[in-house]
Amino acid sequence: MTADVGAVSRKGLSMQKLVDPMVTIDSLTVRFGGVMAIDGLTLEIQSGEVFGIIGPNGAGKTTLFNSMSRLNTPAGGSISVSGRNILDLPRHGIIELGIARTFQNIVLYPTLTVLENVLLGAHHRVSHGFMSWGLGLRSRRGEESEITAEASLILARLGLEHLADRPAKGLPLGTMKRIELARALMSRPQVLMLDEPANGLTLAEVHELGDLLQALRAEFELTILLVEHHMGLVMSLCDRIAVLNFGSLIAVGTPGAIKADPRVIQAYLGGVSEPASSS
């Protein structure tokens, strides 16, 4: 990584001390009508970890991410990031606390350029909104130049600089997923939530993704939460893994321990299915 990109990222994983949890989930409960999507979930995720969350369709994985993003309101429990209960925050306060995510279904603006899509990740850091940039005000030019330069560095780090001025529409799936990742990095997150980033990728792209995430974890001092069905990526990338089934935690541990756990084999790795209403 160049010195310029190093200025964008923070210190690096080697400077971290895995002492206090970055994320604490305590007795989290989420219901949709009569359906218990998450049932009293309790987890601790350490700073700097790549933490996998796996389970059958309907296990509550995306529901957990949506709770952390404030897209739904839990019935009980708490979620704390760096000691702050994020369920007390409005939705726009999540990104300001350093939480960013990508989605199962890519959310890009097809008529905007790749650079413009990535710039949207910094919207909370722009003092008067992006609309003021178009007015050409002298007081905004320095801010615009700084944030655009940062976005350009992130695009270069992800191998997307040659696409900066292209509309996002019509680009390959793997490329669009990198654009979404670049936009998340523009928010300067502490916690990065990735919802099935390998879905639809080729085997070569999955391998590239794993290497990239390992590098970004160190360069940007990230704690990564990974929801993913691609077991090869999960087992090779994650430090620890939690397994959910019907909204309940059935196991948590290292990849080796998870692969050998008979409860996991029966509920997930063995192929038992369940309803897909709260993936």
Image (cartoon, rainbow, N blue to C red):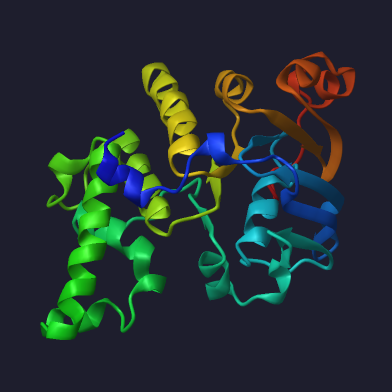
Q: Is residue 197 visible?
A: no
**Total of numbered circles in the picture?**
0
How far from the left and from the top, in percent, is residue 50? Answer: 61, 35
Taking 221 as reference, is 201 left or right? left
How far from the left and from the top, in percent, is residue 276? Answer: 69, 43
User: For residue 117, which quarter of the picture?
Assistant: bottom left
Taking 157 as reference, is 205 left or right? right
Residue at horizontal 38 percent and vertical 72 percent from the top: 125
Q: Is residue 162 visible?
A: yes
Q: Please state which of residues 93 and 84 is positioned toward the viewer in this rendering.
A: 84
Taking 40 as reference, is 223 left or right? left
Q: Quadrant of the C terminus?
A: top right
How far from the left and from the top, in percent, is residue 213? Answer: 46, 33
Taking 149 as reference, is 181 left or right? right
How far from the left and from the top, in percent, is residue 63? Answer: 68, 53
Residue at horizontal 28 percent and vertical 40 percent from the top: 3
User: For residue 78, which quarter of the picture?
Assistant: bottom right
135 to 266, vertically: above or below: below
Residue at horizontal 81 percent and vertical 46 percent from the top: 43
